[in-house]
């Protein structure tokens, strides 16, 4: 049984994400192959949508503000945020205060079955399952010697999207699909992230495994926002 070869993730008491008002949990419609997906564990075919979250508010802030890091490399001072329309320009390290007005901090409770990519057991299973893909990746990119966590957290979207699709196609012992992936942030292994699969119809509410959804203002005085700004060397200004 595949179920015995992978590790199910232990669910947190709450998950968090920063999303556009009025609902941080509102999902864009799947692309259905019309536009190329761009986020780490998106479906390469554009059939199912993926909603991203973190196990705590700090993790949600880390993922959202990643594009604004005060990087010492000036060539990296202009990086688009995939879901925010915010660009760190020549004023790297300065976050416009009015940017916060367009977003909510969402919280919710997670239920269902998620594959834990942090587990050696899961990594070993995917290494066996994706042997041919890995051979192709090593020929193309020449940066990996073995299938390990660096592959699963790769910045190469072609790779991580194929991993997402491979997990989406698995079945649990009960014969249902897994609800998504638990994975470590590339910005720090202490930040736990969630990629939540959504293959419900366009007219349905979606996200059945995300319940008790709430929204609150993304307050610039929120303790985790302040902690993040300090850790990333960012300041709020006009």
Image: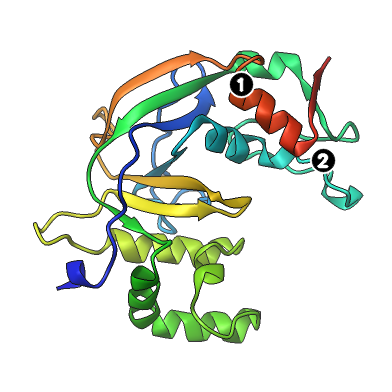
Q: Which residue is mark 2?
A: 70
**Which one is nearer the viewer's eye here, 226 or 72?**
226
Tell me if residue 38 can be seen: no
Instruction: State the separation of the CA atoms marked 2 and 1.
Output: 20 Å
Q: Position of residue 180 (x, y in %)?
A: 33, 50
Q: Is residue 101 left or right of residue 68?
A: left
Specify the quadrant that holds the C terminus: top right
Image-quadrant location for residue 95? top right
Residue located at (35% from left, 82% from top): 128
Side of 28 where 8 appears, left or right: left
Residue shown at the point (34%, 72%) measured from the top left:
121
Mark 2: few/some/many CA within 10 Å (<14, 14-19, 20+): many
Q: Tell me: residue 235, above or below residue 37.
A: above
What is the secondary structure assignment of the residue under circle 1? Answer: helix
Residue drawn where x is 25% and y is 37% of the image:
209
**Residue 189 position within the rendered picture, expressed as x and y whole percent measured from the top left:** 55, 54
Tell me which corner region of the image, top left, top right, bottom left or bottom right, holds residue 29. top left
Residue 35 higher or lower than 93, as above or below: below
Image side of residue 224 versus residue 73, left or right: left
Marking on residue 223: 1
Lateral position of residue 34 relative to residue 221, left or right: left
Q: Where's residue 179, x and y in %?
A: 27, 48
Q: How is the image coloured?
A: rainbow
Residue positioned 75% across, 38% down in the render: 232
- Camera-side residue of 25 and 33: 25
Q: Label 1 near label 2: C-beta < 8 Å?
A: no
């Amino acid at each position: 049984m595949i179920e015995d070869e992978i590790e199910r993730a232990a669910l947190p008491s709450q998950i968090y994400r920063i999303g556009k008002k009025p609902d941080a949990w509102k999902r864009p419609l799947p692309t259905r192959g019309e536009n190329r997906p761009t986020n780490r564990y998106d479906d390469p075919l554009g059939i199912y949508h993926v909603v991203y979250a973190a196990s705590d508010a700090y993790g949600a802030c880390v993922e959202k503000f990643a594009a604004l890091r005060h990087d010492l490399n000036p060539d990296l001072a202009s990086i688009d945020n995939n879901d925010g329309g915010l660009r760190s320009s020549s004023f790297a390290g300065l976050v416009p205060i009015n940017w916060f007005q367009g977003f909510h901090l969402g919280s919710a409770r997670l239920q269902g079955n998620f594959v834990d990519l942090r587990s050696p057991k899961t990594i070993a299973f995917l290494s066996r399952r994706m042997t041919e893909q890995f051979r192709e990746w090593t020929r193309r990119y020449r940066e990996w010697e073995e299938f390990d966590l660096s592959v699963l957290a790769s910045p190469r979207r072609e790779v991580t999207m194929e991993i997402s699709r491979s997990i989406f196609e698995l079945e649990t012992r009960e014969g249902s699909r897994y609800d998504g992936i638990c994975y470590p942030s590339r910005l720090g292994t202490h930040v736990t992230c969630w990629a939540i699969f959504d293959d419900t119809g366009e007219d349905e509410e979606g996200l059945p495994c995300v319940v008790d959804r709430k929204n609150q203002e993304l307050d610039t005085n929120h303790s985790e926002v302040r902690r993040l700004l300090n850790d990333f060397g960012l300041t709020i200004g006009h």
